[in-house]
Amino acid sequence: MAEKTNAAYQTYEGSGLSAIIASEMASCHAMWQRWQFVVDSSNVPEFTRALLPDLSSQNAARKAGYWLKKSKTSARAEKYDQGEIVAMMAEAQEAADEEYAWWINNDPDKQFSLPRNLGTCR
């Protein structure tokens, strides 16, 4: 499982894709939050030990904070008002919840979407 997870992450990690607007940055924040929960709640130590360092709980927490700050800064630069920022963050959380659900439910087509998308949120 860790091997497939690492491979999924690496799919987009080297792609040159990255979050460039506030809503994408908010999505990165929310996905890193979910990933931290995945790792922290795993009861399979072999899985967590075999993950790439980028996918560790500590890195996920650091990245979640980084993308939160960056998304809010970008939103202000993009002239979002406070209500729009709140709505953007809520939408990102909902999308991350869906990615998390695919992961925990072992969706055959979308299970590795979360780690793959984290590759764009470096």
Image (cartoon, rainbow, N blue to C red):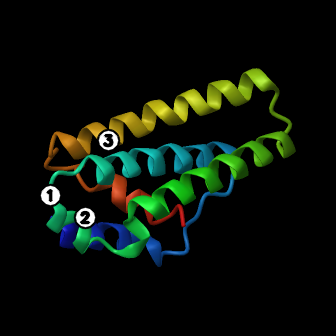
Dot 2, crowdedness within 10 Å: few (<14), some or many (≥20)?
Answer: many
Q: How many marks?
A: 3
Specify which label sits upstream in the sequence, 1 or 3: 1
| Left or right of residue 4, residue 86 in this image | right
Element at badge 2?
helix
The residue sitting at 53% across, 61% down in the picture is 121
The residue sitting at 20% across, 68% down in the picture is 2
Q: Of circles 2 and 3, which is in front?
A: 2
Alpha carbon distance from label 1 to label 2: 7 Å
Specify which label sits upstream in the sequence, 2 or 3: 2
The residue where tag 3 is placed is 100
Residue reaching furthest to the top: 83
Q: Which disc, if any, is residue 93?
A: none
In the rendered image, residue 21, in percent from the top left (x then y), is placed at: 69, 50
Quadrant of residue 94 in the image?
Answer: top left
The C terminus - image quarter: bottom right
Q: Of circles 1 and 3, which is in front?
A: 1
Q: Amino acid at mark 3?
A: Tyr
Q: Amino acid at mark 1?
A: Val
| Left or right of residue 11, residue 64 in this image | right
The residue where tag 2 is placed is 48
Dot 1, crowdedness within 10 Å: few (<14), some or many (≥20)?
Answer: few
| Left or right of residue 72, residue 11 in this image | left
Which of 111/62 is in front?
Answer: 62
Q: Amino acid at mark 2?
A: Thr
Residue contact at pointers 1 and 2, CB within 8 angstroms: yes
Which of 51/102 is in front?
Answer: 51
In the rendered image, residue 74, in percent from the top left (x then y), is placed at: 77, 48
The residue where tag 1 is placed is 44
Element at badge 3?
helix
| Left or right of residue 95, residue 109 in this image | left
Q: Height in image: 50 above or below 57?
A: below
